Amino acid sequence: MWDRAINALNVFLMLNIFFVLLSFGWFAASVVGRSFNVDLGLELWYGLWMPLFQPAIGVLMAGAIAVGVLRWVSHKLTALREN
């Protein structure tokens, strides 16, 4: 049961980290584009920062902590069952 929950959370976090990395790539490209006076959507990116990108980063951090805690609990429960 724990393994399935941890694996599902890991898959979700893997997809989330790719989303965060892609959003960072978009930000970097749009900043470089702005320096060359090319509009690559920096204003749109700024508009999506609070409602989309910032929560995605928060979920990524909280999920990483949750996976660590779940694995620690799983190892402790396994050790208790073996004794």
Image: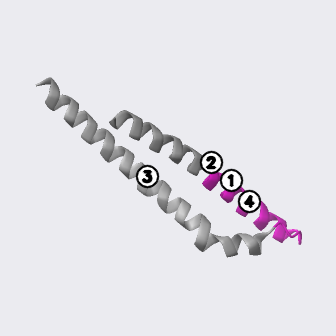
Residue 17 sits above or below residue 2 on the image: below
Q: How many marks?
A: 4
Q: CA distance from mark 4 to mark 3?
A: 23 Å
| Residue behind mark 4 | 26
Q: Which numbered disc, 4 or 2, marks the residue that appears first in the sequence?
A: 2
Q: CA distance from mark 2 to mark 1?
A: 6 Å
Q: Give SS at disc 3.
A: helix
Per the rendering, the mark at residue 22 is 1
At horizontal 67% and vertical 58% (from top left) the residue drawn is 23
Q: CA distance from mark 4 to mark 2?
A: 12 Å
Residue 20 x %, y %? 61, 55
Give the residue furthest to the left. 83
Quadrant in the picture for the C terminus: top left
Proximity of marks 2 and 1: CB atoms separated by less than 8 Å: yes
At horizontal 55% and vertical 44% (from top left) the residue drawn is 14
Q: Residues within 10 Å of mark 3 (few under 14, many from 20)?
A: some
Q: Is residue 77 left or right of residue 46?
A: left
Q: CA distance from mark 1 to mark 4?
A: 6 Å
Q: Type of residue at label 4?
A: Trp
Q: Type of residue at label 3?
A: Gly
> For residue 46: magenta?
no
Q: CA distance from mark 3 to mark 2?
A: 14 Å
Q: CA distance from mark 3 to mark 1?
A: 19 Å
| Residue behind mark 3 | 63
Proximity of marks 1 and 4: CB atoms separated by less than 8 Å: yes
Q: Give SS at disc 2.
A: helix
Q: In this rendered view, identify the residue nearer to me: 60 or 30.
A: 60
Q: Which numbered disc, 4 or 3, marks the residue that appears first in the sequence?
A: 4
| Residue behind mark 2 | 18
Residue 68 x %, y %? 35, 45
